[in-house]
Every structure is written in structure tokens, then in C-alpha cells.
Amino acid sequence: MKKRYNILNAAILVLSLIVFLLVSVNIVATINQRNMEGEIKNYLSITEEIYDGTNMEDVADKIHKANSKLRITFISSDGKVLYDTSTVSEDNHLKRDEILSLGKVFHRYSKTTNEKMFYVATYLDSYSLYIRVSMPEESITDISNSLITYGSIAIILIGIVSIFVMWLISKLSVKPLKSEISKLSDIVGGKTLYNGSDIERLSYEIDRTRDLIENKIDDIEQEKKKVDYILENINHGLIIIDGKGKIIIANKIALTIFNNLSINDSYNSIFDENIVDAISKCMVEESSFSIEYENYVINISSLNTAFVKTAISYGVSMFLYDVTDIKRLEKMKLDFFANASHELKSPLTTIIGYQQLIQNGILVEKEEIADATIKTVKEASRMNQIISEMLELAKLESDKKEDKNVLSISHVTDEILLSYNILLENKNITLVKDYNDFDVSIASNDLYHLIRNLIDNAVKYNKANGKIKITISDNTFVIEDTGIGISKEDQERIFERFYRVDKARSKENGGTGLGLSIVKHICINNNIKIEVSSALNEGTCFKLTF
Ligand code: ADP
């Protein structure tokens, strides 16, 4: 391929030179012809001038001596050659072109001299004769021939030199080309198997490289999509600051938290003073800080990664964690302990009080001591109940799972109801049962606690002469009472620990405020839906869907 290019280039060059040479020869020949025509006409004028009608031989010889190539012919008015510096021709010359058209130069082959000649003639009236001057074309041909000869030699030499120079240039230019090809091969991977010329191989390698780059761009785009997806879907805010202090990455959550933030902003124009201080420290030395900001904890750390750091500063990453739930849980825990302590403190105070009265001999009468003992035992039982229910709640909140049993819901309900016979009788509560039994797969402890708490409340918060209706069907357990009811606002809170609508009433009935919390946990743990509907003073309905 390379050789072909060189030959083609050289051929074009040589062809151009040949055309140039031919055009030059033609131009030179034309110019020479014109010069010769002028010259021959000059000689004719000189001859005409110096001829005085006497000695034509002398005149002709003088001119001939001045230019040996010239031929001077004197012709009589009837066409006969009177004198000729060359061979005298016997032919009549009146019909010759130069005689017929005087003063005009003609160019033709001469039989007399056997060569191509230029002719021009004039007529001298005073001597009644023609003078003709002729000159061989040879001088023009000579110039043209030598021009062609030397030109051709020059062209051949130029052709050879140019082929050599082109070969040398292509050789030198191919060297870096070859190294580029092997570099491309290295990038694409492995040696090329393509067996063409260097240029063809280069184009082949460029194609391979382009394919590789396209694939790499696809890969990078895919990776970028993944990173963007992760950044946008992590539950935390993320901000990256480069070593120049510019925010270069901020995900959606970060932008929501700091709504005045834009990419490329400088960090010190965005954040609070303490955050700015921490970032500044992380930029100068590898360190990390944890700062609270509203409902977030921000972890600020130095980033010693090439794409963010500069020669003098580190980049910085900021992770923003939402701690609203943690704070709420902490508050819940604190509330729980406060409530638990409070709930336990009042029976304990009562117990201690009665015991001190007995100990200090203040209560001495048998009846008084018996009454104090009954009250002490009641308060102790209450404490015991609170502690058992707290333990039950703690158990439900732990991951410890009890074995499940398949239990008949109506059987469990009836068994629990047995222990409420006296209470129902005392309050004169009518019990209505509508059972269409189904089995439930659940830890038996959980099911007993669940049903017992709901029945207990329906009895506790019912009115005298009231009614309780229990309906079991279609995977639902519904318990309705005609009790005191729960207001809309309280319905939202009754599942909270220790929450009681009427504390005194609940306490009187032996309530702890933990029953419905236990119910809620059992429902969550066993995927049971619980719904409550109630109207004040009309009654309450709890519905469980298993
Ligand atoms: P307690 O031990 O006080 O009964 P629970 O957690 O079982 O605690 O119930 C929380 C509160 O919800 C009760 O104190 C009571 O005010 C209200 N409540 C629960 N069930 C009923 C019901 N069937 N009728 C009216 N109020 C109820």
C-alpha cells in the first residue's frame, strides 16, 4: 500500500513535469519562431538596403558571412534564380509562397537544402528583382531538442529523487505510526491479528479503540446510574466537598435538609459556624467529627481520595443521619421508666406507710391491723400485676419467639369467660355469643393474653346491666360492649403504655394501662389487624382480623 502511494505520487509528479516541459518547449519554440521571423526579416531589410543593383554576389556573401546559416537568393522578375548562396535551383520561383505574398514568413521543406526552412522575400522595383532570405529551422529544433533532452533527464532524475524522498519520508513517518499502532493495540488489548498495510492497520486499530471507548462509556454510564441510584436511595444525606472547598456532590436528602445548598457552592457560605469549623479542620488534617444539627447527626470526615483532594487540602464527606426515630424511642423509654417508677411508687408508698403504722404501734387494734394487711396485700398484688405486665411487654418486644399451636378461638374464648362468670353476674352483664369457629396458628400464651385483655376491658368498663357480644366468624373476633365508651382523641392513645382515659377508674378496676399495649404487640407480632370503634357512653367495639 505504502509502495503504491509512493509510485502514484512520483508518477503524478513526473507527469506534471512532462506536461510542464512540453508546454515550455512549445512556448520556447513559438518565441524562437517569432524571433527568427523577426531576424530573417531584419536580414532581408539589411540585404535590401545594402544592395545597390551592381554586385549581388558581394551583398549575398557579406550577409552570409554575418550568419552562415542564412541563404540569400536573388530572383529575377520572371522567377529565374539569378544568384543563390546555396545551390542554384533551375525551378521558376514565381509561384513560391514567399514570392506570392511578399514580406510574409513561410515555413516549408526545401528540396534544394533538404531541410525545413523559413522564407521571406521582397521585390525591388528599381532593379526589377526579388530578394529572398531563408534560414533553416534547425536552430529552433535544436533548442527544442536540447530542452526536451535536458528536461527529460531532469524529469527522470527528479522522479528518482522524489521516489527516494517519498520512500524516506514514508519510512520516517511510518515509524511513529507503528508505535502508535502498537500503543493502540496495547490499549485495546493484545496484539492485532490484522495483516494489512500500516495505514489499514491503523484504521483497524482506531476502529477497535473506538469500539472499546464506546463500551467503556456505556460501562461508565451504567456505573454512574448505579451510583446516582444509590446516592438518591440511601436513607441518609450525603455531601462531598472537594479540597478547594466546593460542594461537588449532594444527594436529594442533603438538598432537602440544607435547602439553600447548590452544587459548586462554597461550604463556608452554607453551613453553621460549628459545621464550617469541623469541615475546615477535616480539610487540613485527617480527622472526623460528629455534630448534631436539628433532628440529624452529621458525621464529617476527611477524604483522602485523589478525585477530591488537592496538594494541600483533603476533601470532606458529610453523612447526615436522621435521628428523629432514635430521639422518639429514647423519649418513649424515658417516659416508660418515669411511668413505671410512678406506677410502682404509689402502691409501694402505701405498703410502706401501713407497715410503718403497724411497726410504730400506731395501728394496734386487731381490725385495724387486718384492714392494713388487706390493703397492703392489694397494693402488693397491684405491683405484682404491673411488673408481670411489664415483663410480658418486654418479652413481646424481644425477638424471642414462642412455639405456635393451632388453637380453636371459640374454645380459648370460652375458657377465659369461665373466670369472668362471677364478675358478669355481679354487674348483671348479659353475654351474647355468636360463634362460627375457626382455628388460629399462634403461641397459646399470646392468644390467651389477647382475648383475656379485651374481655377484661369489656367487663371493667361496662355499665351495670350492660351487654357484651362476642362474634367469631370469617377469621374475625369481634367484642362489643355497652360500656362507658372512648372519645375519638383517646382512641388514638389507648394503645400507649400506661395510658388510661380515667386513671382512678382504671386503678379501681385493677387496671395498669398496659393491657392494650400488650394487645397491640401481640397483634403486630402475629400479623393480626386490630380496629377500634367507640362512642362515649354507648359502648366500644374491638375487631381482630386474623
Ligand atoms: P387498663 O389496665 O387501664 O385497662 P388498658 O391498656 O387495657 O389499660 O386500656 C387502656 C385504657 O383504654 C383504659 O384505661 C380505658 O380508659 C380504655 N379502655 C380500654 N378498653 C375499653 C373499653 N372496652 N371501654 C372503655 N374504655 C376502654
Image (cartoon, rainbow, N blue to C red):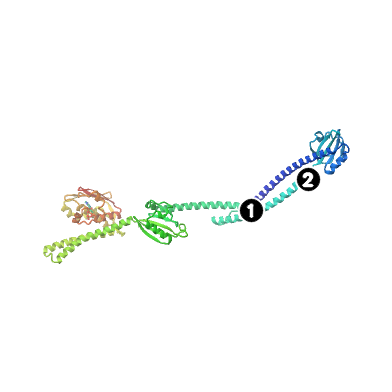
Please tell me how crowded label 1 is: few (under 14), some (14-19), or many (20+) other residues with Cα within 10 Å.
some
Q: Can residue 278 be seen in this snapshot?
A: yes
Asked if residue 366 lies left or right of residue 318, the reply is left
Q: Considering the numbered disc 2 on the image, is that residue within a helix, a strand or a loop?
A: helix
Q: With respect to residue 175, does 364 lie above or below?
A: below
Q: Residue 202 carries which label?
A: none
Residue 148's x, y, as percent? 74, 46
Q: Position of residue 369 (x, y in %)?
A: 13, 63
Q: Locate residue 248: give its quadrant.
A: bottom left
Identified at 64% across, 53% down, the residue is 170
Figure check: 526 above or below 38: below
Quadrant in the rendering for residue 512? bottom left
Q: In the drawing, does residue 92 fall left or right of residue 513?
A: right
Q: Which of 225 and 315 is in front in this view?
A: 315
Residue 311, horizontal then vertical, whole percent:
47, 60
Q: Are marks 1 and 2 in contact (CB under 8 Å)?
A: no
Label 1, on which residue?
170
Give the x, y percent position of residue 443.
Answer: 28, 57
Image vertical order of residue 286 relative to residue 5, above or below? below
Residue shown at 41% from the left, 61% from the top: 287
Q: Which residue is under mark 2?
A: 142
As rendered, which of 149 and 362 lies closer to the eye?
149
Is 257 situated left or right of 340 in this image? Answer: right
Q: What residue is rendered at 56% in x and 52% in y?
A: 206
Q: Residue flagged by tag 2: what amino acid is it?
A: Asp
Is residue 82 shown left or right of residue 521?
A: right
Q: Which of the two labelled residues, at mark 1 and mark 2, occupies the earlier sequence position?
A: 2
Taking the image as drawn, is residue 434 in sight? no
Question: SS class of the residue under badge 1?
Answer: helix
Task: Please state which amino acid type lies under the numbered disc 1.
Answer: Ser
